[in-house]
Image (tube, rainbow, N blue to C red):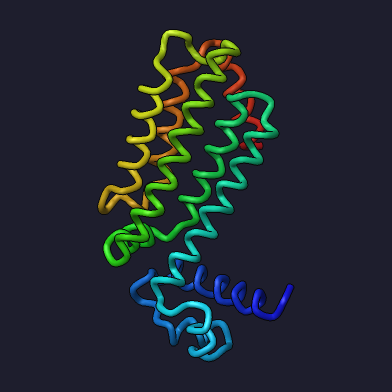
Amino acid sequence: MEKEDQYIQRIFDVAYTLFNKRGFKAVSMDDLAKGAGMSKKTIYKYYDSKASLIKALVTVHIEEKIEQIDKIVKTAANPIQEMVEIGSLVYNHHKEMSSDVLMELKKYYYDIWLFVDDVQQKNMLEGIAKNIKGGIELGLYRSNINPDFITQVYVSSVVAACDREGASGHVHMQYLMLFDYHMYGIMTDEGRSLFEQYKAKLNQ
């Protein structure tokens, strides 16, 4: 890794830790410089403002999550396993995230929040719709459901739960309940049996 890449990685690591612990507003560029063990001038060499650093950080974070999800999609044996593993990934992500992070992002860095929301919703809509259609073809989801409608309802529900003021501390539990509600509403008996097997294995 080149020296500049090492600097950027160090800035990212410190920023992620401080932002997640204290929120975006409370952390200054001085705090970031002190935590990274470098001058504020060095940080400004790569990021001209805290907002540009936050956007770069969340962009990398989103890209990493998308890569993880793509890997699950490629390796899952069927749509049920795919959903269980992605559901676990998202659940743990929300569980580990500071309860104030999303609310602060929306309040103080609205343009960045819109960018994050747009990318996440687009990927969710495409991924869920494809999963449902694949599950119907394999007889794991009911054939009498409308994939596009179910996708819209599920994604809208998840987004609303994550975005609701004052509920962010319990987002991971709300997500889990919505996830189960969605899955049990669309699965056939065969799909339900697989679903419970995968969940049991995941919790071992």
Dividing the image into 4 quarters, which one contains the N terminus? bottom right
Q: Residue furthest right?
A: 1
Q: Pick whichever, 181 or 145, lies toward us.
A: 145
Residue 3 position by quadrant: bottom right
- Residue 7 location, x and y as percent? 62, 79
Residue visible at 56% across and 46% down in the picture: 66
Give the answer, above or below, for where 180 lies relative to 121. above
Q: Quarter of the image containing the C terminus?
A: top right
> What residue do we see at 61% from left, 40% from top?
70
- Residue shown at the point (40%, 78%) measured from the top left: 49
Q: Position of residue 58 (x, y in %)?
A: 47, 60
Query: Which residue is the extreme one toward the top?
Result: 144
Q: Judge from the rendering whether residue 84 lies leftward or rightward of residue 145; answer left or right.
A: right
Tag count? 0
The x, y position of residue 4, in whole percent, is: 65, 79
| Residue 179 left/right relative to 36 | left
Q: Position of residue 185 (x, y in %)?
A: 42, 19
